[in-house]
Image: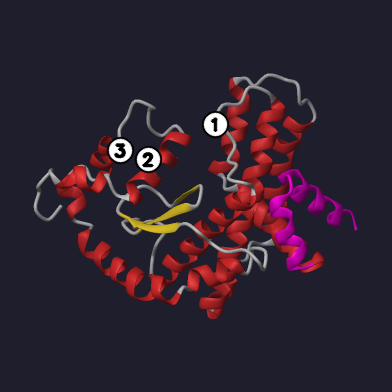
Amino acid sequence: METGNSEYLLEISNLDAATHLYNHALHTRRIKSTSSKLELVTNLLSPIDKQRELLPIFKERLNFAKEDLAKSGIAEKIALQFLPVDFNFSGSLFFTFGYNHAAYGKTCNLNLADTTSIKNVNSMIHFAVHELHHVGFIMLKGGYMPPPDKFTYKEMLHEIEYLTHFEGMALYAQQNAFLMLEPKNAMDIDIPLRELQEFEKEYFDIYNHFKNKPDNLIVQEDWYKFHLLDDKSLWYIVGSQMAKTIDKNLGREKLVSLISEPSENFIATYLELNKQ
């Protein structure tokens, strides 16, 4: 970006970080299977004049990421508190310019050019914890991530269960990172009980819509319901509440043991606790 020399794009596209982003983009259908890593990198860094404006803040964050976040291992240490005691990471956390924070296989990335969700250095750690937990989760699932194609209610339900477990656990770990790093602002992550109940009702209305008729074929209206879970952050909010409830009532060991089980067990455990 500083030189305007497009020859660097090919070099960038050969980096391991570019391979990680490319694999995630292919899996989530953000790019076509005919696209190349070079095309992905070029798109992420375009238009170069506008992206260049983000360089000062990016450089500042990159320096913190290398000198403090990476060397201290603080995000890894917090994420490990929400994974089995014998778990070890064996992949990479990449610091990238562009492409939202994402995890795929044993790798994940933190988009340091994100000026929306990353507000300060502590929030960089929060999101690093979130993405690292995703990596641990995927590894404990044997590398499994739901395929993007779904045709029946049963397949849709399976993805809802997985993502509720996946995002709920990662957000719960991230919230705990917030509490550790910013205890004076602890109230900032609290959701009023009434709102939480409304979120949960809306979540389970959608969940049961798919659960009660597993053999139904998906129609366009069903996709609308599915996307509401993401648009309203329902599987994040409700999933983190599930994780918190299990953690407080059954203990951390039970909570993390559920990761390697089918994700429906995570939700069933929460529902069973709610009956009591």
Q: Considering the numbered disc 1 on the image, is that residue within a helix, a strand or a loop? A: loop
Of 86 and 276, the residue lying toward us: 86
Left or right for 113, reference 246: left
* Lower position in the chain sequence, tag 3 or tag 1: 3
Of 91 and 44, the residue lying toward us: 91
Residue designated by label 2:
22
Residue designated by label 3:
37
Name the residue type under label 3: Lys
Residue 276 found in image quarter: bottom right
Residue at figure coordinates x 39%, y 27% from the top left: 33
Residue 236 pos. (x, y %): 60, 51
- Taken as a whole, is the magenta stretch helix, strand or loop? helix
Q: Residue furthest bottom?
A: 184
On the question of residue 188 being in view, the answer is no
What's the image's color scheme? secondary structure
Residue 239 pos. (x, y %): 67, 52
Above-or-below relation of 122 to 262: below
Q: Disc 2 to disc 1, how far (Cα)?
A: 16 Å
Q: Considering the numbered disc 2 on the image, is that residue within a helix, a strand or a loop? A: helix
Residue 67 found in image quarter: bottom left
Residue 198 pos. (x, y %): 70, 49
Of 102 and 225, the residue lying toward us: 102
Contact check, label 3 and label 1, Cβ < 8 Å: no
What span is colored magenta in the figure? 251-276
Residue designated by label 1:
148
